[in-house]
Amino acid sequence: MSNADSHKATLESHSESVDCSACRHRQTLLMEGHCQPGDRCVMSISGRQIERFFRANPEESIGYLTDIVWQRRALAARYAPVEYLKHMFADPDEAVRRTVAYRLPKYQLLAMIDDPDREVRITVADRIAIDQVERLVADSDYLVRAYVAQRLPAGRLFRLIRDPDRQVRKVVAQRLPAESLVLMADDSEPEVRRVVASRLMPEQLTLFVDDDDWTVRLEVAARAPQALMSALQNDPDEEVRTMARQRLSSPGPTTGAAPEERC
């Protein structure tokens, strides 16, 4: 069977499963060709067909915002005028609330700041007004806090320096003002310390000459003043020793490239 024949069979199958006699649009949109069973059908079980229906008839979306079927509500929320969504932040289905969080005006998003669904809270963290984003700094989910760390003004990141999740701390280390980076020099995770080492002033890298992780020491060897190279040319790791010796034989400084992961 060709792709065209398969598509036709699928449409016919969906068409046969939909009872147009029970649809409110049978005497209007159906007769006018604005909906079509198997293709653009709000009564279908297919999300694609429902979405095509609202795309063709966006004015009908308002009437489905309280529909019993969550998929119709979620898709209707994409096309309904925004002013009709302000009471939908408490919809029982998270897919509906995700759409609402994406479309509500920023000043209305505070109503969704404690939503039980993390994807909703991520959307809120990503869209909420910048002067409100700190209200999510203690969220229970690390991805939400990571979005917060990406958006907070750099001078307001101090509350996340000791965040329990390393991904959040990596974002903080990438954005924290350079003069405050030493506060993260003792981080427990090598990935975080490597970010810190990549941003510190070269003369501050003495903090990491004896770091437990070779990738952190390699960052030091790539960026530190040559005065530190004598200590690193005898490093336990071959790549660190090689970098230090190259730096000692080089006439000028180098910032070095970020070390690649190694097994």
Image (spheres, rainbow, N blue to C red):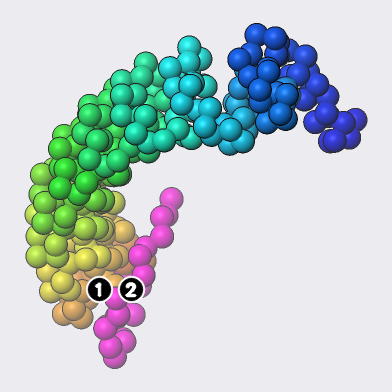
Q: Specify whether residue 63 is in view.
A: yes
Check whether the beta carbons of the residues at disc 1 and disc 2 lie within 8 A of each other: yes
Check disc 1: other Cα within 10 Å, few if <14, some if 14-19, many if 20+. many
Q: Quadrant of the N terminus?
A: top right
In the figure, residue 224 lies in which quadrant? bottom left
Using the image, determine if residue 164 lies above or below residue 201: above
Decide if residue 242 is on the left or right side of residue 125: right
Between marks 1 and 2, how big is the CA–CA gap? 6 Å
Q: Which residue is identified by label 1?
A: 223
Decide if residue 51 is on the left or right side of residue 88: right
Using the image, determine if residue 244 lies above or below residue 50: below
In the figure, residue 181 lies in which quadrant? bottom left
Residue 148: mark: none
Outermost bottom residue? 251
Decide if residue 58 is on the left or right side of residue 232: right
Q: Position of residue 261 (x, y in %)?
A: 41, 55
Query: In this orientation, which residue lies closer to the viewer: 128 or 26?
Result: 26
Q: Which residue is identified by label 2?
A: 256
Query: Looking at the image, which residue is at 84% across and 36% down?
Result: 3
Q: Which residues are magenta?
A: 241-263
Query: Looking at the image, which residue is at 34% across and 24% down?
Result: 88
Majority secondary structure of magenta residues = loop
Q: Position of residue 223 (x, y in %)?
A: 25, 73
